[in-house]
Image (cartoon, rainbow, N blue to C red):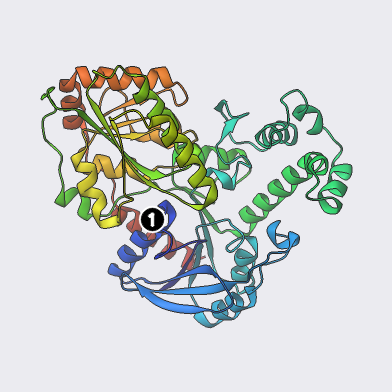
Amino acid sequence: MKVVQSLGFYFPESSGGTEVYVDGLVNQLNSQGIKNIVAAPKNGTQEITYEHNGVTVYRYPVFPNFTLEQIRGVTPHGGFEYFVQWLQQQKADIYHQHSWVTGCDIHHLRQAKKLGMPTVVTVHVPGNICLRGTMLLNGEKVCDGCIEQKRCGTCWGMARGIPASVAPLLSRIPLSLSAIAHTKFSGVRLATALATPALVAMHQNRLQEMFALSDRVVAVCQWLYDSLLLNGVPEEKLILCRQGVDPTYAKTKVNLKPSTQTNKPLRIGFLGRWDKIKGIHILVEAVCRLPLNVSVELVIHGLVQGDEGKAYQQQVLSHAANDPRIRLAEPLSRTDVPDAITSFDVLAVPSQCLETGPLTVLEAQAVGTPVLGSNLGGIAELVKHGVDGWLVPAMDVAAWSEAIAYLNRNRNVLDKLRQAIAPVRTMKEVALEMANLYQQMEKL
C-alpha cells in the first residue's frame, strides 16, 4: 500500500504540531510495511525532493505574489500544476491531507478525488472550523463551533476590530449585498466589514465541500469531533483518533524527582510559539504579580515567527524586564525537548484558544512532568485537575498567580500529581489505527 501524506508546511524549515504528527505517523506506518511519501508546498518556482527521517518528501512550488482569488481559495496557487502532475505519477492507494491553507487546500483534495483516490482529511486546528481560529465566541467563552452566519459574522467582525455594538448589525447584511462588497471592494475597511456574511458563507460552503470530497474525516480530540458532527460531517465518515508521542519518550525519560525541596525555586517551563493565543503574556504577568520573595523560575523556550511574533515577544519581555525570575531561553530542537521538560517541576501551557492537543501536554506527561494548563479544549481533555495536573481559567491572571504560588508552597502536591500520571498514547498506536482505516478504505 502507498499513501500520500500532504500538509501545508514541513521540516526542516517548519516544525509545528502537525509536522511533528505527520513525521511520527509516516515513520510508524513505514515500520508496518505501508509506504508513505510526504507532499508539502514550498515558496518559490521550483520543485524539489529530499529525504527526512528516511521518508521521501516532495516539495511543490507555490509561486509568490498571490492574487486575491488565490488568497480566497477561488483559484489554486501558482505552481499547482506541478502538484497535479506529481500526484498523477504516484499511483497511490490513499490520499491523506492534514492542512487547510493556501498551499494545501480544497484544490489539492479535489485533484485527489478526480484521480479516483480514496481520501482522508485529518483536522488538526480550530481554524478549519472557526474563522477566528480560537473557538472562543467573541473572544470570551467556549463555542460549540457550529457555523451560523449571524453569530460567526459578529464574532469575526469583533476580531477584526469592529465595535461590539456594530458587528451584529453587519452580520445581518443580505448575502447578495455582502457578496458584492466581498468581490468588488476588497481592501477597503468598510467593504471588508460589509463582506463578512459572504466570507462566513464561503467558509461554510468550503467546509461542506471538504466533507463531501473526504471518504473519512479524522478528528484528533473530542471537542473537535463534536464540532465537526454539528457542522454536518456524516457520523459514518467521522473518526476520533487522538494524537500520540514518539514511542521513545516513555522509554528514555521518567521525571520522578521529588519537589519537596522548597529551598529551591519552583522551575516552570514554557515551550511554544511567541503568539498571543499561546498565552505567554498571561504567564509572565502572573509571575510578575507574585511578591519577589516567592521563589520561582520561569524558563521560556519560545519560537519567534514573523513580524507579529517579534512584536509580541518585545511587548511581553518589556513588561518582564525587571523581574529576575523570568528567563528567556533558546528554542529547542526536537531531540532536546524531552530533557528540557524533564528538568522542569511543572510545564505551563497557558493557551488562549481551544487546542486540539497540544502535543507538549502529551510530551510532558510522557516524561512524568505535571502540566499547569488552561482549562480549555484539548488541554482539559488530557489533564485531570488535581489528579495528574492543574487547570486554571485561561484568561484569569490572578488565578494563574494563585496556582503558581500554591504549587510553590505545596511541593508535595506536585509529587502526587507526578505519581498519578498514566502512560500516554504513542504514535505507534495512532499508526495502527490509521493502517486499519486505510485497509478498510481499500475495500470500499
22 vs 73, left or right, is left
Q: Quadrant of the N terminus?
A: bottom left
- State the image quarter where residue 321 is shown: top left
What's the amino acid at mark 1?
Tyr
Residue in the image at 54% along x and 50% along y:
307
Rendered position, 74 above or below 271: below
Q: Residue furthest bottom?
A: 89
Rendered position, 178 above or below 380: below
Question: Callout 1 environment at 10 Å: few (<14), some (14 to 19), or many (20+)?
Answer: many
- State the image quarter where residue 166 is shown: top right
- State the image quarter where residue 35 is shown: bottom left
- Tally of numbered discs: 1
117 vs 206, left or right, is left
434 vs 293, left or right, is right
Q: Percent x, y for residue 280?
A: 42, 35
Rendered position, 42 above or below 99: below
Q: Percent x, y for residue 332?
A: 30, 52
* Callout 1: SS: helix
Q: Is residue 256 visible?
A: yes
Q: What residue is shown with label 1?
A: 21
110 vs 135, left or right, is right
Q: Percent x, y for residue 343?
A: 19, 41
Q: Is residue 355 visible?
A: no
Residue in the image at 30% along x and 56% along y:
333
Q: Percent x, y for residue 323?
A: 32, 28
